[in-house]
Amino acid sequence: MIIYLNGNFVSEEEAKISPFDHGFLYGDGVFESMVVTNGLVFKLDQHLKRLYDSLTVLKIKIPFSKDELKKLVLETLRRNNLRDGYVRLVVSRGVGYPALDPRACEKPTIVIIPSTKTFPQSFRGSYSDIIDKVVTVSTRKIPSVCIEARVKSLNYLNNILARIEALEAGANEAIMLDLHGFVTEGPGENVFIVKLGCLYTPPTHNILNGITRQTVLELAKNMGIKAYEQNLTRYDLYTADEAFFTSTFGGIKPIREIDGRKIGLKVPGPITEKLKKAYESLLLKEGTPIE
Ligand code: PMP
């Protein structure tokens, strides 16, 4: 793969980041992951908007407009002839003496990493079409008053600990609760449930406002499915008719079981299936062409 790194297109071997980079030293940076289907980058403008919002909150300035960055993303994909895969944009505060002070960083590090859709076979359970076993974990979501959940920052420690907890419990994926016990999200996915024909998902104050989540809410509206953004508890998960995760990486992933409770009679349930089909056909026809 050819990687974009600070103004140059380089090979994977040449794509080296300094040990003095604050992204590496402190997780001081942001990122976005986008999906490319059939030569179309899905919701590129929305991802760029979220990236710039994250940068604004962290006070990291980059020398590119959204349009310029968009051109670089498309150029990276063209150079790799990547028509189906993922592309990740990473921006860190940049290289500085290993001191916490952000003034040490004169310019941000900007990296664009394309990748295919292949991943190690041993990861299957967590990335298969249906997520069999999900557990709510003891790792709580960091409240947004501490670290704003809508900022897609390089700090994923809690999410990683949540995934580790799930794997060690013999499950495929985790759902984190907030400090009050309300459902938040998975380590890299938003959560939806279906109950009596309506869709429910947690509100955005303590979760990442996923682009797939927003797309599902739009699709539901167009399909006449009532959707509510409201606090959910484990009771709501256990008694749901259907449940699914959403993410750029995995799309819509039906869930079979949460904390040992089977969700619904058939997985995927009818509404999940309908939304999944609609989402997948959108990926094939909507997006910014790489050519
Ligand atoms: N929550 C978290 C914590 C995530 O990392 C992701 C993946 N970016 C999501 C939700 C899903 O967001 P999106 O649909 O934008 O990929």
Image (spheres, helix red, strand yellow):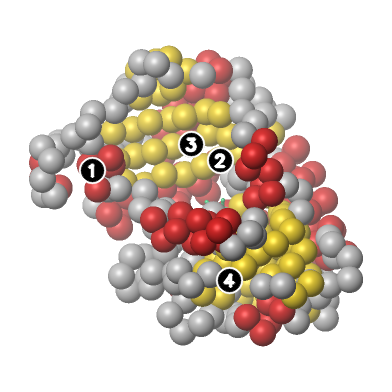
Can you tell which of label 4 and label 1 is closer to the viewer? 4
Q: Is 5 positioned to the left or the right of 83 in the image?
A: left
**Residue identifier under label 2:** 34
Q: Whole-percent x and y of residue 106?
A: 15, 36
Can you tell which of label 2 and label 4 is closer to the viewer? 4
Q: What's under tag 2, amino acid-wise?
A: Met
Residue at image position (36%, 15%) is 14
Q: Is 25 positioned to the left or the right of 135 in the image?
A: left
**Residue identifier under label 1:** 25
Residue at image position (74%, 62%) is 255
Q: Mark 2 touching mark 3, by CB under 8 A?
A: yes
CA–CA distance in space, label 2 to label 3: 6 Å
**Does label 1 or label 2 sit earlier along the sequence?**
1
Callout 4: CB less than 8 Å from ligand 1: no
Residue 16 placement: quadrant: top left
**Residue identifier under label 3:** 88
Q: Whole-percent x and y of residue 120?
A: 62, 34
**Does label 4 or label 1 sit earlier along the sequence?**
1
